[in-house]
């Protein structure tokens, strides 16, 4: 009897130990931690708890050189190990951000033994008086020191990240110099010896600096990849080609110099844009060409996520500093809707997405999106702040649509055959009549922010346009529709 009991326990133990971890998601979605939130176990826990409650599948988290190698040659992996365990415990995936020689064009993250020794680790004087000079990209000593630390980090990850939580690593962060060029002695010499100094192209200093930074970052990336071969990338502080020098870090992988980066940094798997402005759509197109689109930083605004995932086919998109938005009800509620849709999005169906990003867009603007044999005319509702959505085609006549702030018609002679609203993957209501214009349109009325046990939970959604109900904000709803031709 006892033997049988023990055998039973042993087989249960075996079963649990053999249970495979779910495969990593093919699309990473979530937030980038605020810069200092991976610097203690306590703040790692707080940030990751919030990530879980927002429904993220992944988080981008900084690893700072100064905390990793406070004393030259002595590496402290305590925080990295803590982060790996904390993510594993919560079933979250990670992208790590190597804040090495540069972050936002500055050099505040190298350890003090690097920063204080400006003779060995020399600087690139900038043309902006109030900025301290960053380390020069022509400083071989800095490059060698950075490489040692980054390689140690990657070798450690290979050994310590048993459940493969880390899916990618960003090498440095928004590199570049706030100047036309690097005016250190080495920088001037390199310029004089470079063919770019004899070019008539007004962008020559930008190409020259991009080449310098790309080679430095690639050198670091190559060593890291040799230690542990997982996807590596770096990110750009965006700025148009003609923006005045000194106003952005010149040399980073901006659109104007993307080709220079692609040529000089072959060990990076892709180059990423940090998109904070109205240029979302153009930047998705520029950075999605010939490489995966991966957006490590954007505003915590849901429409950006829907567009990046649905229309631009992003493989990764993250809201920067999501911790600051914990009390923004639109954002937190919309994150839940995205997490409900993500498994379907990741199945790789044909998709479209839309967002009304530019507030100057005509209020009655109609966007026509073709998908399969159908046409979706998306009308943004006047005065709506949040007009955005995604359309996923799951069968020739069937679509799952998430969105808010717009209504969609399907052109002449096409009607809705069936329409239901989903919540938590279950039917919430079957929609018809007023709610679908008698099946001539899909009205993205969105979800109301009403407590489920509140008295108004079942009210007609049309009421949300009445002044008394304006306070009841709405976020994207999820609708499943079938269309037919008349
Ligand atoms: C871009 C940087 O990459 C981030 O680390 C952060 O500093 C944001 N800008 C601004 O908050």
Image (cartoon, rainbow, N blue to C red):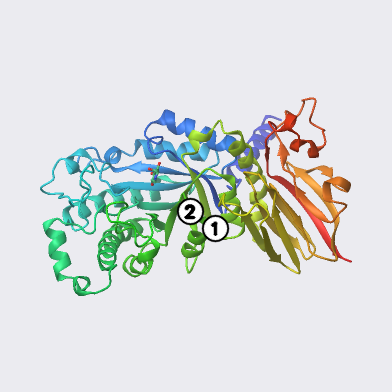
Res 201 → quadrant: bottom left
Image check: 215 left or right of 484?
Answer: left
Q: Which mark is residue 295?
A: 2
Vertical side of 50 occupied by 20: above or below:
below
Image check: 41 left or right of 437?
Answer: left
Q: Earlier in the sequence, mark 1 or mark 2?
A: 2
Residue 231 visible in the snapshot: no
Ligand 1 is found in the corner quadrant, namely top left
- Alpha carbon distance from label 1 to label 2: 7 Å
Vertical side of 278 occupied by 255: above or below:
below
Rendered-image quadrant of the C terminus: bottom right
Residue 185 placed where, x, y %? 11, 58
Residue 404 placed where, x, y %? 69, 46
Residue 385 visible in the snapshot: yes
| Residue marked by disc 1 | 314
Q: Mark 2 and mark 1 in contact (Cβ < 8 Å)? A: yes
Rendered-image quadrant of the N terminus: top right
- How packed mark 1 is, by other alpha carbons closer than 10 Å (few <14, some 14-19, many 20 or more), is many
Residue occupying the point 65% across, 60% down: 352
For the residue labelled by badge 1, is the local secondary structure a helix, a strand or a loop?
A: loop
For the residue labelled by badge 2, is the local secondary structure a helix, a strand or a loop?
A: strand
Vertical side of 199 occupied by 191: above or below:
above
């Amino acid at each position: 009897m006892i033997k049988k009991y023990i055998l039973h326990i042993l087989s249960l133990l075996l079963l649990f130990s053999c249970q495979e971890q779910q495969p990593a998601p093919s699309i990473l979605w979530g937030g980038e931690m605020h810069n200092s939130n991976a610097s203690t176990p306590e703040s790692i826990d707080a940030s990751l708890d919030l990530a879980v409650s927002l429904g993220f599948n992944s988080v981008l988290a900084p690893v700072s050189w100064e905390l990793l190698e406070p004393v030259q040659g002595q590496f402290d992996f305590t925080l990295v190990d803590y982060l790996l365990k904390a993510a594993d415990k919560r079933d979250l995936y990670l992208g790590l951000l190597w804040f090495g020689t540069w972050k936002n064009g500055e050099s505040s993250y190298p350890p003090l033994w690097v920063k204080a020794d400006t003779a060995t680790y020399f600087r690139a004087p900038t043309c902006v008086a109030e900025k301290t000079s960053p380390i020069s990209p022509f400083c071989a000593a800095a490059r060698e020191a950075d490489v040692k630390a980054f390689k140690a980090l990657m070798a450690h990850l290979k050994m310590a990240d048993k459940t493969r939580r880390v899916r990618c690593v960003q090498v440095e962060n928004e590199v570049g110099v706030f100047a036309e060029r690097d005016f250190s002695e080495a920088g001037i010499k390199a310029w004089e010896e470079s063919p770019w100094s004899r070019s008539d192209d007004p962008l020559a200093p930008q190409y020259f600096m991009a080449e310098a930074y790309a080679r430095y970052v690639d050198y670091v990336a190559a060593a890291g990849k040799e230690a542990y071969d997982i996807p590596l990338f770096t990110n750009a502080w965006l700025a148009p080609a003609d923006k005045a020098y000194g106003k952005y870090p010149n040399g980073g992988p901006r659109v104007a110099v993307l080709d220079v980066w692609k040529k000089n940094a072959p060990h990076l798997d892709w180059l990423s844009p940090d998109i904070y402005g109205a240029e979302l759509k153009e930047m998705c197109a520029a950075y999605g060409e010939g490489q995966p689109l991966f957006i490590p930083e954007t505003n915590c605004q849901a429409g950006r996520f829907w567009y990046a995932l649905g229309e631009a086919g992003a493989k990764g998109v993250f809201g920067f500093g999501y911790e600051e938005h914990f009390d923004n009800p639109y954002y937190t509620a919309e994150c839940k809707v995205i997490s409900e849709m993500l498994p379907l999005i990741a199945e790789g169906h044909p998709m479209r997405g839309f967002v009304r990003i530019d507030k100057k867009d005509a209020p009655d603007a109609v966007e026509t999106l073709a998908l399969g044999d159908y046409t979706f005319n998306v009308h943004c509702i006047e005065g709506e702040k949040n007009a955005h959505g995604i359309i996923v085609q799951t069968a020739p006549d069937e679509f799952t649509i998430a969105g808010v702030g717009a209504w969609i018609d399907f052109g002449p002679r096409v009607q809705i055959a069936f329409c239901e609203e989903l919540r938590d993957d279950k039917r919430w209501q079957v929609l018809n009549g007023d709610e679908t214009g008698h099946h001539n349109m899909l009205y993205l009325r969105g979800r109301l922010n009403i407590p489920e046990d509140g008295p108004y939970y079942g009210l007609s959604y049309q009421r949300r346009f009445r002044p008394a109900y304006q306070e009841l904000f709405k976020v994207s709803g999820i609708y499943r529709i079938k269309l037919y031709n008349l």
